[in-house]
Amino acid sequence: MLSKGVVLRAALKRASTIRCLSEGWRGDVDEVKKVALSSDPPFSKIVDYYFNKAAPFAEDAINKTVKARMTKDIKERLVSGVLSDLKPCNSVLSLSFPLRRDNGEIVTIHGYRAQHSQHRTPCKGGMRFSDEVEEDEVKALAKLMTYKCAVCDVPFGGAKAGIKINPRDFSDMELEKITRRFTVELAKKGFLGPGIDVPAPDMGTGEREMSWMADTYKNTIGTTDINSHACVTGKPIVMGGIHGRTSATGRGVYHSTKIFLDDPQYMEMVGLVPGVSGKTCILQGFGNVGLHTARYFHRAGAKIIAVIEWDGTIYNPSGIDPKELEDWKLEHGTIKGFPGATETTEDLLEGECDILLPCAKEKVITEENADRIKAKVIAEGANGPITPAADEILIKKNILVVPDIYCNSGGVTVSYFEWLKNLNHVSYGRLTFKYEFDSNKHLLQSVQSSLESRFSGKIPVTPTPEFERAMGGASEKDIVNSGLEYTMERSGKKIKETALAHDLGDWKLEHGTIKGFPGATETTEDLLEGECDILLPCAKEKVITEENADRIKAKVIAEGANGPITPAADEILIKKN
């Protein structure tokens, strides 16, 4: 089944640029095994674990495709060096600064910014406020950003920032002081700028914090930079933001999952009917990502039967309306008490459903609960919600997992569109609105004139409601949504091609045998003589002999191997027609 390793293989092939030689990308084999068996490995170790699983396949593919005048040995060392250089973070900034709180107390604030790779610049990645922020986590998330950008072919290197605070414990004035001071420190040390490093919103931050960062940069380091507003993305519209950015990550989760839900081959493998409509979903996390993910699935005809939040879980087998739940949460500050569902203490992460949407936090599906997961499809809206040990269990259970580095990359894709808008200093569609309207109007007039000249008399040509809406030209939101959908579809197609090239998750390559493959049953019967239309002997010579030829039931035999049929067996097969 599709695994994170398969998606990473596509990413590494795109992200690799020859820059250095080293001792190789391979880490400590024992450490890799330790992560695979651990029930609660550090998040940074999980990221490295998947890198180590994907790198051998990327290395082999790159060695085959790189054309250069060098010996095979030098080329292999060169490619190994590239992968080695992609594994660690290039730069990590650790900051501490004082904050005078509203009550006069002085506290020390700790923050980090990690730049994983500058193979493409600027670096790109969110900034989060959380009391769980630590340096290793920031570095791991920066690595994931590089891979996300590579998967979706967005020309950024990966980065991440975090400030170790709980934003609920600070006033708005204090949060503004923290954000502006952090911005100045990043800019002074070369970790912020339109062509250097471009942060975006993440956990605990939003448009407000991005506007503070953009304003601070513009009035300090960027006073003479006409592109200063491109130093961050996720800004309010009035400060150069873009329509569709707020919902982009959730929309990306929907589109990336839909790519596989619409594929008959993948749906047959997990036992579902193709399509989104009618599918039941359980959502974990009702923040920005979870809300918009639920909205798009709901609009497509799926039923959100349960929502899991930090302070409670609600359930309604008939479906929960995300808009009504959003209004309730805005008014009451919680999903508890929502009249459109029933509260429950049951762990519905393990509930019966078609699609599980973990959009809250990392490591929620572990070795302990993976075997109880009943969903057929899991779409990783959060970063790293599944541990490596759990991933192995889910593969054996034949559960389709749409990995985070593809599934939640909608945010960085639309951030790229916003960054381009800021550099171009014009909103999408502004230059083409009038031209498109006139062109469509002339098209209708031309059709009407042709019909009237052929059949005589007045023949009005009335546009359909859809065409009439399109006649006015695409709005910025239309263009952004269309670009995001196209990006997710194109990336999904590439991922499928990679998955097929490696046998849908490389069961044999990863386990050394076809035994235990979750998509089939083992048998001791000699199926060379089994009932079938076509027999494909592709292993070795002389497998069909005088002894078993008369028991062959196939109508057609295609000799994939050299000489699989002996002359005596051939005479028998001819007589059997």
Image (tube, rainbow, N blue to C red):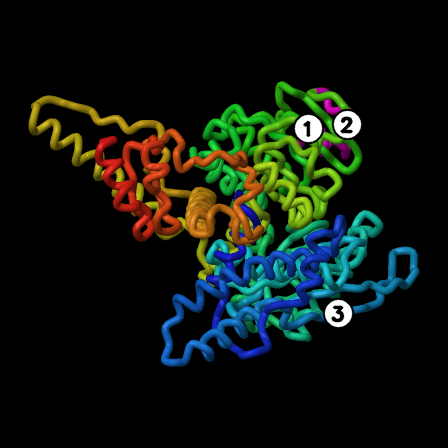
Instruction: Report the span colored magenta.
Output: 325-339
Give the number of the mark in front: 2 or 3: 2
* In this picture, residue 366 sits left or right of residue 303: right
What residue does disc 1 label? 351
* In this picture, residue 114 sits left or right of residue 432: right
x then y, percent, for residue 151: 50, 55
Q: Residue at x 55, y 69 (%)?
A: 83
Kind of residue sitting beneath label 3: Ser
Please tell me the numbered disc located at residue 94: 3
**CA–CA distance between discs 2 and 3?**
41 Å
Q: Residue at x 62, y 29 (%)?
A: 323
Above or below: residue 30 compared with residue 464: below
What residue does disc 2 label? 346
Kind of residue sitting beneath label 1: Gly
Asked whether 126 or 330 is in front, the reply is 126
Image quarter for residue 552? Answer: top left
What is the crowding at mark 3: few (fewer than 14 residues within 10 Å), some, or many (at least 20)? Answer: some
The answer to whether residue 245 is visible is no
Q: Earlier in the sequence, mark 1 or mark 2?
A: 2
What is the crowding at mark 1: few (fewer than 14 residues within 10 Å), some, or many (at least 20)? Answer: some
Give the number of the mark in front: 3 or 1: 1
